[in-house]
Amino acid sequence: MKIKSINLLNYRNYSSFSTDFNPELNIFVGDNAQGKTNLLEAIYFMSTLRSFRTQNDRDLIKFDEEFFRIQCEIDTDVSTNKAQVVVLKNGKSIKINETMIRRSSDYIGTLNCVIFSPQDLNFFSDTPRTRRKFLDIEATKVSNKYLVALNHYFDVLKQRNALLKQPQIDEDVLSILTHQLIEDMWIIVDYRLKMVKSLNKKIKLLFKKLSQEDNSIDLQYQTEFTTDSEQEFKRLMHDRMKQNKMRDIYFKITHSGCHRDDLSAYMNTHELNQIASQGQKRLVLIALKLALVEFIYDKEQRNPILLLDDVFSELDQTHQQRFLENVPSDSQILLTTTSIDQLKELKRPMSVFEINKGQLITRRDLNG
Ligand SMILES: Nc1ncnc2c1ncn2[C@@H]1O[C@H](COP(=O)(O)OP(=O)(O)OP(=O)(O)O)[C@@H](O)[C@H]1O
Ligand SMILES: [Mg+2]
């Protein structure tokens, strides 16, 4: 999958912007605060319908404007699709090839991107919520069943917690909601377990190749019951919910469930955070993202687009080269940097875009 072109209207510091992209490597260069990350953010928005920097879509509308619009052309092996999203202060509308898309779930998957941004360096020291969100966002890109179960799970959880807050609790309703919660939970936990198992295999190899070190990386999904058996999971979970019932009612909150799970990383059986250097953490995160690229390929037989915000330029030349060797050869890469000096040496067809105050100043095509 490749992004062929983009057109922005009133997005962050872009009034009006349009360009097409190199199918291989795209480098956005410019001083600080010129709009490099904003551009990657707009592409990411077309992938997930959310930003990786803000929860609030309104922040993305150019100051003093009423809406923003992003249009892009996406090449797949079989066709070129046009996608458009318009975000107003009170809602958004989505189109693919002139057809209105009513539900976000029918849009997700149209453009598949994997992003690596500086915030990711705190990934394993951040709260479990960050890591669950990562698993959820990535799983929903490739599994509609997961997306449906996840949305339903959070609806039911909300209802259950609201019920627990009532002065008089209807036990029948509580038991129906508990049952529904466990039905969705199985789909979610089972998928996350399989996904982490697959990522784990891949990250081990990728980290070795990138670092050329002997350290072994291990990812583990932390959940209440790890089992392949749906029946056993549901039985154990029903028992657990029964045990928790009085506590849930007393504290007016649902204590057990996959909204409490976590993903941890170990380096040679020690917690990654406690022993890894900054450089090692960066490589683990890069290996994780590359593992994700392979995971998406396994599911879709298509490589996602790689968005690298400021990260690539932090690597030394040897690691940059190793990174590129481990990216599938037909993956499209878009990256930002404040200095092009080091990157000029890369032997790859590339386009270098100079960005200044939300405008494209120059574009140079190299090695083509
Ligand atoms: N809603 C908005 N409307 C207009 N301008 C905005 C909006 N949101 C952010 N900006 C501006 O966008 C600029 C930041 O853009 P961006 O984060 O893309 O910078 P950058 O080029 O990636 O810089 P750095 O190298 O520091 O990461 C800032 O000047 C900021 O004021
Ligand atoms: Mg930036």
Image (cartoon, rainbow, N blue to C red):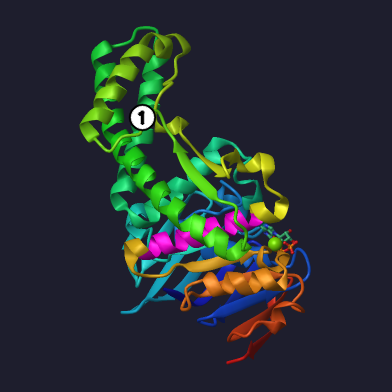
Answer with left or right where residue 344 lies relative to residue 100: right
Could you say which quadrant of the image residue 334 lies in? bottom right
Could you say which quadrant of the image residue 175 lies in? top left
Mark 1 element type: loop
Most extreme residue toward the left is 231
User: Looking at the image, which is closer to me, 89 or 51?
Assistant: 51
The image shows residue 235, relative to residue 95, as above or below, that is: above
Question: Residue at coordinates 32% horizontally, 46% vertically from top-left?
Answer: 146
Question: Disc 1 marks which amino acid?
Answer: Phe
> Which quarter shows the C terminus?
bottom right
Question: Residue at coordinates 46% horizontally, 63% vertically from top-left?
Answer: 293
The image shows residue 298, relative to residue 368, as above or below, that is: above
The answer to whether any part of residue 140 appears in the image is yes
Give coordinates of residue 352: x percent, y percent: 66, 82
The reply to whether the magenta stretch includes residue 37 is no
Quarter of the render that holds ligand 1: bottom right
Question: Residue at coordinates 33% horizontally, 30% vertically from top-left?
Answer: 156
User: Looking at the image, which is closer to me, 35 or 224?
Assistant: 224
| Secondary structure mostly seen in the magenta stretch | helix
Give coordinates of residue 362: x percent, y percent: 70, 85
The answer to whether any part of residue 86 appears in the image is no
**Range of the magenta residues?**
282-297
Give coordinates of residue 87: x percent, y percent: 50, 57
Give coordinates of residue 123: x percent, y percent: 60, 46
Query: In this figure, which residue is indicated by the disc labeled 1?
Result: 225
